[in-house]
């Protein structure tokens, strides 16, 4: 898988799915969900720093709460390229991978700043930034395979032999 | 193997499984609601299979936004209606109740069966012995097509319960207390099993409350076992129920918990009793007992939301709706209303809520500054009467 290069936006611990995609936006049509990305965040960190290809770098338990897939879909439609966190809530993490949005578990939030440009190698498990390299466990082969398919649906289609 | 491992091994058709092992499990039932089903249907159609794995093992439920509060919400119901007719799967769309309550009332499976629902509170069914896995829409679509789910066998943490539960302490207080001990993420990718001689004091409904909120401390699977201690657990903690007191989760995380007495006296503006967490008959009984012959505080909106039409009917038969209404509270239609910020009780920065629901994240019920405290129905009802956070005397 290609390395992911982008500008960092730093976020805190326990950024929940109501912050990523608020309840009032859950009934929005699929194509419109991205407009509400991070609309529930109590700070302007995302609004002020977002750009296509940006990389979110958060603390513990990112994506805790609801199973709403609208949350990672909103991030993907808002052109977030990757989410790095010290830890992810299980359902959110799987939702990201299933829709083809890469996630990476790494202890990077205290070593990077908003605006840093980093290059992330998911296969090697490295983040290369302006102040050196951060290493973590590489993304598993199974997850890489799903991401390379572009998500779970194309992978299931391939496995079921549907052209 | 512990209980969760035994059940997962059975679902995977294996003699034995170990933590960390990747397995493919047979799924006993699949369901989604009006927030998760529309995208699941879109993804299912993208897969391109001609039928669901078993139409008798799939159900769709409209519970989050019923009656529709926007045209877009109504359009989502039509998406589900079209799918229901085309693929021959049942759709509950007339306010029958919350998905997890309807699973209990209408689609109970056998103990140990694996149920997959596109909702994070799927663990609720662990209260009656099933493995509930919450997933997102895409994973649900795949399960609906294949009848299987890939997962990794979790490490299992055991809570061994002893002692006698005080009369004003409930399942809600137990799971909030576990949040205060573990924090919001200790159980991510782990399972939680509750055992020990103390579990007999928890009814099925109370057990459902405990399992419902396992996700708020990260748990992948939460389930009640037996009075016997489970072997082969990653960790075991013993809790003497006699030492517990009523608990309350403070803004802005369900695991930010203190004893209710530490917040006693704080002025409130709204009370919500309901949801998949605490909208069952035993919860409504606490409300009726507290409200009988009394009035709620004039500065407080009190919203009572039964988890199903069946429960609402039982409340009516017992005269509890009249008691509640005469006390100055409002009984809303069964469903998820008031819990999650789309309709039926949105709040401003001036509001302070005591709710029996499961989340108090910023903006969960409207304003990002609005304060939500999570507690048991007994604590919520006692607070509704006084207008301040109050330790219940039951």
Image: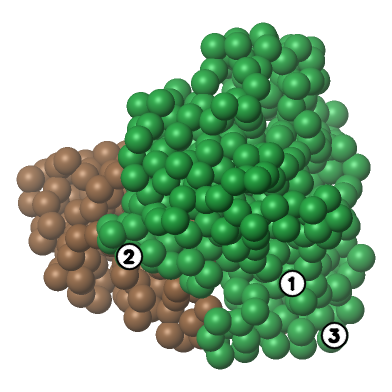
Chain colours: A brown, B green
Same chain for mark 3 and mark 1? The answer is yes
In terms of image quadrants, where is residue B348?
Answer: bottom left
User: Disc 1 and disc 2: Cα gap in Å?
Assistant: 27 Å
- On the rendered structure, is A127 left or right of B201? left
User: Disc 2 and disc 3: Cα gap in Å?
Assistant: 41 Å
Answer with mark 1 or mark 2, whichever residue precedes in sequence: 1
Mark 1 or 2, closer to the camera: 2
Chain of the residue that carries numbered disc 1 in the rendered image: B
Mark 3 or 1, closer to the camera: 1
Which residue matches tag 3?
Answer: B85
Residue A44 in sight: yes
Is residue B390 placed above or below B119 in the rendered structure?
above
Where is residue B159 shown, x and y percent of the image?
62, 19
Which residue is more in the foreground, A4 or B157? B157
**Quadrant of the image containing the C terminus of chain B:** top right
Which residue matches tag 1?
Answer: B95
Q: How crowded is mark 2: few (under 14 residues within 10 Å), some or many (20 or more)?
A: some
In terms of image quadrants, where is residue A22?
Answer: bottom left
Task: Give the residue at x 79% y 15%.
Answer: B227
Where is residue A116 shown, x and y percent of the image?
11, 58
Chain of the residue that carries numbered disc 3 in the rendered image: B
């Amino acid at each position: 898988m290609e390395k992911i290069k982008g500008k960092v936006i730093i976020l805190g611990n326990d950024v929940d799915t109501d912050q990523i995609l608020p309840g009032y936006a859950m009934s929005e049509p699929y194509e419109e969900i991205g407009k509400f990305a991070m609309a529930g965040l109590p700070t302007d960190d995302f609004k002020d720093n977002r750009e296509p290809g940006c990389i979110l770098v958060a603390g513990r338990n990112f994506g805790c709460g609801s199973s709403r897939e609208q949350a990672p879909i909103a991030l993907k439609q808002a052109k977030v390229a990757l989410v790095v966190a010290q830890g992810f809530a299980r359902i959110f993490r799987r939702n990201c991978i299933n829709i083809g949005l890469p996630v990476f578990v790494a202890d990077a939030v205290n070593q990077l700043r908003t605006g840093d440009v980093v290059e992330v190698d998911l296969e090697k498990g490295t983040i290369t930034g302006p102040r050196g390299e951060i290493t973590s466990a590489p993304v598993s082969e199974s997850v890489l395979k799903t991401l390379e398919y572009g998500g779970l649906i194309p992978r299931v289609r391939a496995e079921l032999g549907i052209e | 193997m512990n209980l969760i491992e035994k059940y997962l091994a059975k679902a995977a058709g294996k003699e034995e499984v170990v933590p960390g092992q990747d397995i493919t499990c047979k799924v006993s039932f699949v369901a989604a609601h009006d927030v998760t089903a529309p995208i699941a249907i879109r993804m299912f159609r993208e897969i391109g299979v001609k039928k669901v794995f078993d139409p008798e093992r799939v159900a769709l439920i409209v519970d989050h936004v019923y009656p529709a509060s926007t045209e877009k919400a109504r359009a989502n119901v039509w998406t589900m209606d079209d799918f229901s007719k085309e693929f021959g799967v049942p759709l509950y769309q007339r306010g029958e109740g919350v998905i997890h309550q309807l699973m209990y009332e209408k689609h109970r499976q056998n103990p140990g069966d694996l149920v997959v629902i596109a909702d994070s509170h799927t663990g609720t069914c662990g209260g009656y012995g099933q493995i509930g896995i919450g997933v997102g829409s895409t994973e649900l679509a795949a399960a609906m097509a294949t009848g299987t789910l890939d997962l990794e066998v979790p490490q299992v943490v055991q809570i061994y319960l002893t002692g006698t539960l005080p009369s004003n302490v409930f399942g809600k207080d137990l799971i909030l207390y576990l949040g205060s001990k573990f924090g919001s993420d200790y159980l991510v990718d782990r399972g939680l099993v509750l055992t020990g001689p103390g579990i007999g004091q928890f009814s099925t409904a109370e057990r459902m409350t405990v399992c419902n909120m396992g996700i708020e401390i990260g748990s992948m699977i939460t389930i009640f076992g037996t009075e016997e201690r489970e072997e082969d657990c990653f960790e075991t903690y013993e809790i003497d129920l006699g030492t517990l007191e009523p608990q309350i989760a403070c803004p802005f995380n369900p695991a930010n918990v203190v004893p209710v007495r530490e917040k006693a006296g704080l002025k409130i503006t709204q009370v919500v009793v309901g949801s998949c967490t605490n909208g069952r008959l035993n919860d409504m009984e606490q409300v009726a007992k507290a409200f009988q012959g009394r009035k709620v505080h004039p500065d407080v909106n009190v919203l009572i939301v039964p988890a199903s039409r069946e429960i609402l009917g039982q409340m009516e038969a017992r005269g509890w709706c009249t008691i509640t209404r005469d006390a100055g509270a409002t009984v809303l239609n069964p469903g998820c209303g008031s819990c999650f910020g789309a309709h039926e009780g949105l709040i401003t920065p001036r509001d302070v809520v005591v709710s029996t629901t499961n989340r108090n994240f910023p903006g969960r019920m409207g304003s990002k500054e609005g304060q939500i405290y999570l507690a048991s129905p007994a604590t919520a009802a006692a607070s509704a009467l006084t207008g301040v956070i109050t330790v219940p005397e039951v």
